[in-house]
Amino acid sequence: MTEPLVLTPQQIIRKKAAGEPIEPDDNEISQAHTIVVLVENTIGAFVRVINMFSARGFNIDSVTVGATEDPSISRMNIVTMGNGRIIAQILRQLSRLVDTIEVIDLSDTDFVERELCLLKVCYTQDSRSEILDINDIFGGKVVDITAKTMTFELRGPSKKIDAFIGMMATHTIVEVARSGRVAMQRDS
């Protein structure tokens, strides 16, 4: 019979930081990470980043891309899930890509995030006021209305968008379009 492996305090700290399991039955700790990638605004730069994720079997929860204050540089906001080891590997591989200028994991910093959501929901005379009350609570805006549906626009953190969709789920949601997370590090 083998003795259980005893870890030193330093090994436990390293494993926790890397998101690795400490006990044999533990699962690796996986969490969402917001990664900002500044790339040269050239043909194929976006495709190379996305292909890197695809080739390594990493999933992307959301991605937004746009030009920065310098038109020759694009800013990519990528949200992905992983433990510390996987995220470190993603950051290293992104840094090695040809068009990459800078890679920043915002997850361990203080940052501001926003997302845009358009949500179309069916309504009846009975449900109309309740739907509009939910919209008012979340600070949404009615951007289109027909005899059977209303379309709302909501901006804010992803958790707020998730909560709004959850509240509207009791009604018949026809369509949801989300922009993906846009994030920026706060000044300290």
Image (cartoon, helix red, strand yellow):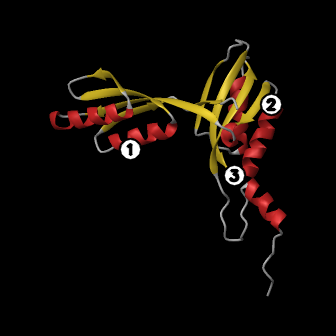
Percent position (x, y) of residue 136? 32, 31
Please state which of residues 105 and 37 is positioned toward the viewer in this rendering.
105
User: Tag on residue 14?
Assistant: none
Whether the residues at callouts 2 and 1 have beta carbons within 8 Å, the answer is no
Instruction: Say whether residue 86 is left or right of residue 153.
Output: right
Separation of residues labelled 3 and 2 (CA atoms): 22 Å
Residue assigned mark 2: 97
Percent position (x, y) of residue 30? 64, 53
Residue assigned mark 3: 83
Instruction: Say whether residue 159 is left or right of residue 48.
Output: left
Separation of residues labelled 2 and 1 (CA atoms): 38 Å
Residue in the image at 80% along x and 83% along y: 3
Q: Residues within 10 Å of mark 2 (few under 14, many from 20)?
A: some
**SS of the residue at dot 1?**
helix
Hey, what amino acid is under mark 3?
Asn
Residue in the image at 35% along x and 27% along y: 152
Residue assigned mark 1: 166
Residue in the image at 67% along x and 71% along y: 25
The quarter of the rendered structure image containing the N terminus is bottom right
Mark earlier in primary sequence (3, 1): 3
**SS of the residue at dot 2?**
loop
Percent position (x, y) of residue 59? 63, 43
